[in-house]
Amino acid sequence: MNLHLRRLFGSASMLVGLTLRSTVRHVKVKLTPTARREVALQQARIATASDVKEQFANARGLMTKLAQMAGYLDAGVEPELRGALASFQRDAPTMEFSLAERSILAEIPDFYRLVKEIDPTPRASASIGQVHWARLRNGEEVAVKVQFPDAADLIGADLANAGLVTAALKLLFPSMATGEMAKELVVRLGEELDYRNEALRTQTFADYYRGHPRIVVPRTYPGLSSSHVLTTEYLRGRSFDEVLADTQEVRDVYGEVLFRFVFRSLYRLRLFNGDPHPGNYVFLEGGRIGFLDFGFTKEFTPSEIATFEAMIESMVLEGDPVRFTKVVHEAGLITAGDLDPEAVADFFRDYYDIVLEDRRLRVTSAYASGLLHHTFDHSHPVAKYLNVPRSFVVLQRINLGLYALLGYLEATVNWRAVASEIWPFVAAPPSTPIGEEERRWQQAVGHTGEHRNTDG
């Protein structure tokens, strides 16, 4: 049996087994007398969470990526299940260090000429690789990410089974239509396999944000990087789960920094880091955040950015549904040009909700989950005319990722005022202390509203 068939059979068997056992448990709950039903339901949820965690424990590739997503995207997922999957954000299945070392030396033979020591126990792991702490001979601490030797074959086998992708997503997100999410995952996983691309992207972000008072991107070490090994500066800090115990004031600061990073990168650098999940952030002292993992980064053309800006202008600044409808039709987001503009604006307004008013607004998990479900809800009268061009599929990661994180933080900020600072077509003065810090940084490094001028 070839690899594709083995992956299909193994993953399908796992998903079918999980689904059947979960269904049986819920049937038993329904048959339980009302007085004991709540206890039975809780027991069923715990059993399902334990079952899912056990089954995913030895999975890699696509299955790990799905586990990571399910652990944070939707606050509507049962807490027990979300908690069981939370460990996959940084502690996915790993490989023995002997295999990792073999991969390193195969591509970087003089690795130990520059590296004094390396911890054989991974500090973190993900869907296609794991990260080891190391110290260079000059004393610098670095993070060495090593791709699993079989990652390309496993991902290729997973991507060849498109039906499996959709089925797995349906298990983890049972209330949503998951076809577009599946397509996005296929693209994302395929692009992550070459670490040389990630090294270039990471360095681009690091160069742009060098000296930023709140945003830290680790620099790369080209001499210790290759197609399957990526070495970057090691950042020490706290995890996302740890900062959830901070005061609301501190969480608001972190929420603002996350928001500024995503939208400054998009509108000023024309780049979007498409994997905003909790394991990709390190929370540092002084309200700073270290941003990791740039394996899936989309560079937008000036014309694409112009479309995004026109959508904001017509929806947020002008409140003009007629112009907005024209813009989204020309962008290919809707397939018909004669739709009721009010209905079109009603469908898309949810995505702009937190910047519609110039006031402090708390982002909640309920809001984030609502956006997630709205994205895959086909009941709205405009939904049947929707299309998702490639650039907008990538942008959905803002709705699927960033707002989920802001919701867990319950971040309360005047998002409209902060966004107005970042939008080049508004370029408002600083509205917060962080905005003042950012203005001084911009002046010091000479950044302008149009940092990149390439189209393509």
Image: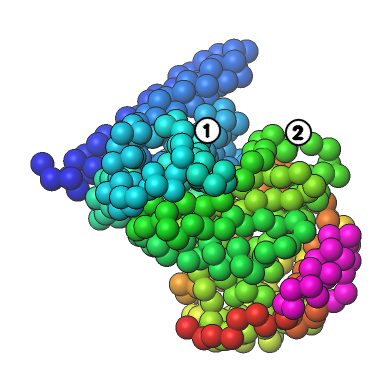
Q: Amino acid at mark 2?
A: Ala
Q: Which mark is residue 87?
A: 1
Residue 453 found in image quarter: bottom right
Residue occupying the point 68% across, 86% down: 323
Mark 1 secondary-structure assignment:
helix
Q: CA distance from mark 1 to mark 2?
A: 17 Å
Task: Please provide the residue range marked out in magenta.
Answer: 428-447
Q: Which mark is residue 223?
A: none
How far across and down, in percent of the image, does residue 35 sit?
62, 13
Residue at numbered disc 2: 245
Image-based side of 122 in relation to 342, left or right: left
Mark 1 is surrounded, within 10 Å at the Cα level, by few (under 14), some (14 to 19) or many (20 or more) other residues, namely some
How far across and down, in percent of the image, does residue 200 sit?
48, 66
**Does 3 appear above or below 177?**
above
Given residues 44 and 98, the one toward you in this image is: 98
Q: Is residue 266 visible?
A: yes
What predominant SS class does the magenta segment belong to?
helix
